[in-house]
Image (tube, rainbow, N blue to C red):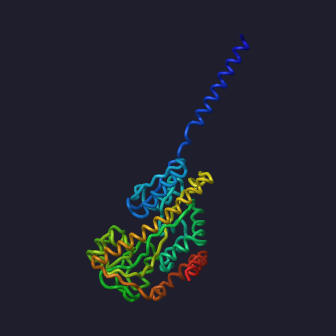
């Protein structure tokens, strides 16, 4: 009877172990919930692309990763979001390279006026080996750049006159983003650079505090600035790429298979964003022209670029390690 009892206990333990194993096999793998930062509102090209990225990742990983995009900057401003993504508090984000300079000095090269000849040239450069160099620099700061978005070309607009030559900028009070390179750009053209919050520009134009500003077609149109400043001149002086970035910690937690899925989804998102941006820019141009805005091509950009030489010289003097990056970008567009 004693032997029988021992076998009975052992049998119960075995049955329990088998039942536990079967239960574990039946339980689904817990999904990784990803939080994504986005400063743009619903419906914006970047937002549509990011939400498509999230959907594709969730579907292709069969729910192992479930990204969610938080729009309209509800998770903080870009500097805060950069730090949160670097630390892994956020898992992914769409960042403009303009404010990235304090964290990743190499990206300051992208803020040099006229560093790119056109949006198409920017895409060509960033999709190639030079873009990989910027991605490497971002990776050193715990940001994995998987694809590059566009944000159009920024051009000058004002209330006074068309800008066709650098001399046409002289004396104009022009709002710029808070970056020394942009201040120097306007100053070197003979204008008066005025750093100012974007939200204050409409009223400043209306009251004459400033004569003009600079931005891309969609921002110029959606902000209503075209209602006051009706001269839009295609200087295309600043063409800033944006990244779809993943937190390094989130990236390294993925299997190799899921890394490939996430990378492909990011590349697909970039294609979608670029397409939607081009369509939106065209629609914005048509709207402002219909409203009476005078749009003029700048036929001699070389004259503007010549005025930027002191800025480039000082930049290279202060950042000699970035000189090859500047010259390689210029050479890639020739």
Horizontal arrangement in the rendering, residue 107 relative to residue 15 (left or right): left
Horizontal arrangement in the rendering, residue 179 relative to residue 3 (left or right): left
Locate the C terminus by quadrant.
bottom right
- Picture coordinates of residue 218, whole percent (x, y): 37, 70
Residue with the most extreme right position: 3
Q: Residue at x 46, y 65 (%)?
A: 273
- Picture coordinates of residue 93, whole percent (x, y): 48, 59
Horizontal arrangement in the rendering, residue 12 relative to residue 93 (left or right): right
Residue with the most extreme left position: 207
> Which of the pair 328/297 is nearer the observer?
297
In the image, residue 14 above or below residue 181: above
In the image, residue 211 above or below residue 224: below
**Residue 193 visible at all:** yes
Locate the N terminus by quadrant.
top right
> Which of the pair 151/325 is nearer the observer?
151
- Picture coordinates of residue 75, whole percent (x, y): 43, 55
> Which of the pair 50/311 is nearer the observer?
50
Q: Residue at x 30, y 84 (%)?
A: 160
- Picture coordinates of residue 176, whole percent (x, y): 39, 75
Q: Residue at x 44, y 73 (%)?
A: 152
**Residue 317 visible at all:** no
Number of dots carrying numbers: 0
Rendering quarter of residue 315: bottom right
Horizontal arrangement in the rendering, residue 22 relative to residue 269 (left or right): right
């Amino acid at each position: 009877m004693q032997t029988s009892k021992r076998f009975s206990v052992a049998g119960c333990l075995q049955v329990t172990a088998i039942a536990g194993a079967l239960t574990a096999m039946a339980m689904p793998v817990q999904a990784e919930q990803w939080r994504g930062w986005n400063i743009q509102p619903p419906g914006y090209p970047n937002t549509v692309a990011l939400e498509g990225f999230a959907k594709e990742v969730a579907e292709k990983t069969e729910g192992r990763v479930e990204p969610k995009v938080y729009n309209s900057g509800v998770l903080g401003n870009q500097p805060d979001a950069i730090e949160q993504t670097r630390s892994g508090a956020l898992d992914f984000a769409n960042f403009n390279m303009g404010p990235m300079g304090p964290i990743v000095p190499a990206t300051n090269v992208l803020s040099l006026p006229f560093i790119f000849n056109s949006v198409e040239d920017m895409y060509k450069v960033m999709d190639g080996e030079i873009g990989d160099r910027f991605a490497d620099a971002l990776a050193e700061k715990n940001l994995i750049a998987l694809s590059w978005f566009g944000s159009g070309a920024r051009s000058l607009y004002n209330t006074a006159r068309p800008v066709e030559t650098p001399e046409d900028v002289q004396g104009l009070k022009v709002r710029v983003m808070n970056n020394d390179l942009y201040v120097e750009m306007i100053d070197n053209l003979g204008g008066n650079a005025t750093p100012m919050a974007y939200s204050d520009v409409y009223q400043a134009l209306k009251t004459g505090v400033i004569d003009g500003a600079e931005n891309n077609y969609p921002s110029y149109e959606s902000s209503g600035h075209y209602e006051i400043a009706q001269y839009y001149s295609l200087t295309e002086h600043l063409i800033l790429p944006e990244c779809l970035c993943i937190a390094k910690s989130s990236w390294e937690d993925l299997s190799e298979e899921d890394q490939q899925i996430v990378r492909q989804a990011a590349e697909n998102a970039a294609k979608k964003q670029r397409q939607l941006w081009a369509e939106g820019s065209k629609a914005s141009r048509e709207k402002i022209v219909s409203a009476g805005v005078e749009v003029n091509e700048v036929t001699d950009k070389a004259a503007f670029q010549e005025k930027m030489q002191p800025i480039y010289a000082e930049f290279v003097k202060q950042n000699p390690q970035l000189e090859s990056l500047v010259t390689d970008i210029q050479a890639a567009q020739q």
